[in-house]
Amino acid sequence: MMTVAPQTKGLHRTFFTDAEAALALLTLFLIGARIFVGSGVSIGLVLAFVLLPLWVPRLVASRAGFWLAITAAVSAVSGVWLTAVAAQDHDTSQSTLIATTLLFLSVPMVAGIVVWAQRFVSLWIIGVTYGLGMVAAAVMRPSIFAENPWKFAIGLPVAVIVLSLTLRSRRRLSDMLALGALALVSVAMDSRAFFGVFTIVLLLLAWQAMPRISNKRMSAAKVLVWAAAIGVTVYLIGTSLLVEGYLGEDAQARSVEQQNRAGSILVGGRPELAATAALFVSRPLGFGAGTIASPSDILVAKSGMQVINYDPNNGYVENFMFGPTKFELHSVTGDLWAYFGWPVLIFLVIAVVLMIRRVAVELARGTATALLLFSVIITAWNLFFNPIYSSAPFFGLALGLALAGPHLRFEESPWREQSRNR
């Protein structure tokens, strides 16, 4: 029998490992680029399904990843079942069913592929690759550049790329300078939410870098209290700056109007939350991933918005929130509940606990990175204030970073290290 020399085995292992790493990065890039071939099916998602045997075992290797996968699968089935139930008194669309289900499943897919890719390459490479994919998606859709390119197209992808590059340097000062620049650009480009998120991440990194009075490590629970205090402080100060006009006249006008109307910039800025609450009370089980809103659903949503003194009879509700093919409640939680019902809420609880726990632990250790903090905080914001379509890429990245192991110091595959040791 012919034997294979150890050197040849090592070369074979290196080749297949490098090929697997390239596939993982290519998949992340293509998912981020969102090159659709029809009904919400993209080239990246097709490749992810083909490579499912490679990344799913990495996703379900941890308890949190296992339950994320289970609840995601149950939620997808729930979306189909709710659509069938709603078909008795609603119009339904098979293409919408496919598109919304794939959109949701892209979240655990990205998380699993990030964990899989981290076996071969550093997290900063993963972040840059995924960010470049999202930039490509924006560039291929020039229409979204018309109003505010930074706010609606390239701001967040650029942030992912920049914070991934500073992750490579492993210097807190690089992270802080980058975050300060991103926050200033957000002010100049009239993006209040981005400014707030970048500021919170910057303050958390600064707090993490401060010397402790005691040598004892701070508990994760105390870290969360401090993080919440920083978030509330930024909101209060930011609200004051907005209302006083320090962040621009346009932002001031919108903020004053929203505060006067609803008593809060958050509530006034997102009247869709009131519509979601009214729909939840009216139909708590949800509607289904392929269900089209009925006229009675629209009336229920409008009544909820009127409670916070918002005038819903302006075309926005009919044309954007409840167009001919979708529910668009302008929050990840609202959208996913409408599509998939209660099972997806369990998925969200697991995801939130996972992300918060990882952030708390890393902050307590003094090892939290700007990329991790940014992706988790922007996802927490999106849960209540941004639709699932624009939020899914960052949601998947945040989950992947939360599930990934410690940042590894290698430029080559662990397989190569093992082969050398042998």
Image (tube, rainbow, N blue to C red):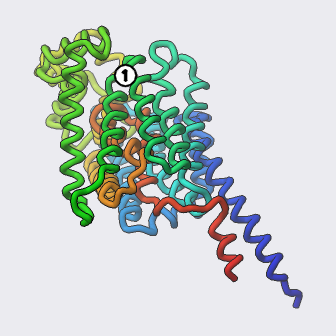
The residue sitting at 38% across, 36% down in the picture is 388
> Could you say where residue 142 lies in the image, as x and y percent from the top left?
57, 19
Q: Nearer the viewer, residue 20 or 196?
A: 196
**Which residue does the image show at 88% across and 87% down from the upper left?**
2
Q: Quadrant of the C terminus?
A: bottom right
What's the residue at 23%, 40% (across, down)?
230
| Picture quadrant where residue 131 is located | top right
Residue occupied by mark 1: 191
Callout 1 environment at 10 Å: few (<14), some (14 to 19), or many (20+)?
Answer: many
Q: Is residue 100 above or below residue 210?
A: above
Q: For this rendering, which residue is in front, 209 or 5?
A: 209
Q: Quadrant of the N terminus?
A: bottom right
Residue at position x 27%, y 9% from top?
314
Left or right, 44 with reference to 281: right
| Numbered label tally | 1
Q: Residue furthest bottom?
A: 1
Quadrant location of residue 363? bottom left
Res. 233 in view:
yes
Query: Residue 148 location in percent, x, y?
Result: 45, 16
20 lies left or right of 77:
right
Q: Secondary structure at mark 1?
A: loop
Q: Is residue 350 visible?
A: no
Q: Is residue 373 left or right of residue 95?
A: left
In x, y percent, where is residue 14? Answer: 74, 67
Return the residue found at the far right: 2
Position of 317 compared to 154: left or right? left
Q: Nearer the viewer, residue 337 or 220?
A: 220
Q: Nearer the viewer, residue 204 or 283?
A: 204
Q: Inspect the image, locate mark 1, and give the three-letter code of the amino acid beneath it.
A: Ser
Q: Position of residue 405 (x, y in %)?
A: 46, 63
Determine whether 282 is above or below 251 in the image. Answer: below
329 vs 383: above or below: above
